Image (cartoon, rainbow, N blue to C red):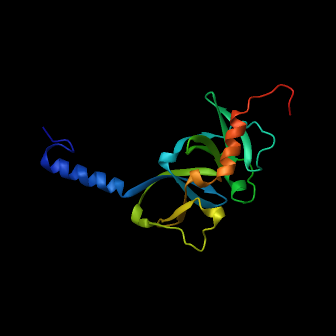
Amino acid sequence: MPQAAGDGENGSVSGVAAERAVQDQAQMVVFKLAGEYYAVDIHQVREIIRVPEITRVPRTPDFVEGVINLRGSVIPIIDLRKRFGLEAAQASDEQRIVVVEMEDKTVGVIVDAVTEVLRVDRDRIEPPSPYILSLDTQYITGIARLDDRLVIMLDVARVLSASEREALARFEKEPERDGEV
């Protein structure tokens, strides 16, 4: 009977080598935004959905599109183009909401299109240049060098400032009041 990978002395060694290879890689969800490629760590992504009808919420920052009901949970939706100060996009069938875990909050971010789930060797990821980093770009964690393109890696937990996260938490918790606008 043939040995399964991981069985026996040789299988264990190759299993350990394979595990190390996976640890030396970053797995990410890649998406397009204004013609550029961005990625978030797959561990921050809960799911990817089509853009449903979004309920607007008054007195929220302009980049907050509103909220959706996702299987009984109210999820705030952020337009990443607006958050990054990019030109607004026309609605399309390719747009998606990437539902992410942002510290202890679940938030949806609108992107132009999700292109792939990708594994990249960590040695192909460079830290962002200090020349491009500012208080407004602290969410950039690195730039992955692929054969045919560069992918900007984001930490979604840093996309919003602490005060913006608090504002989102407040309007999520506020009960709806009849007749109030």
| Residue drawn at point x = 64 percent, y = 47 percent | 109
| Residue drawn at point x = 53 percent, y = 66 percent | 150
Residue 107 percent coordinates (x, y): 62, 42
Residue 114 percent coordinates (x, y): 58, 50
Q: Is residue 56 above or below residue 22?
A: above
Q: Please tell me in which quadrant of the rendered image residue 132 appears.
A: bottom right
| Residue drawn at point x = 66 percent, y = 47 percent | 165
- Tell which of 79 and 116 is nearer to you: 79
- Tell which of 88 and 143 is nearer to you: 143
> In the visual, does 69 lie left or right of 21?
right
In what quadrant of the picture does the C terminus appear?
top right
- Tell which of 79 and 149 is nearer to you: 79
Residue 31 percent coordinates (x, y): 58, 53
Residue 71 percent coordinates (x, y): 61, 28
* Residue 79 in sight: no
> In the visual, does 117 lie left or right of 57?
left
| Residue drawn at point x = 73 percent, y = 54 percent | 89
In what quadrant of the picture does the N terminus appear?
top left
Q: Please tell me in which quadrant of the rendered image residue 7 appears.
A: top left
Q: Is residue 37 above or below residue 77?
A: below
> In the visual, does 46 lie left or right of 27?
right
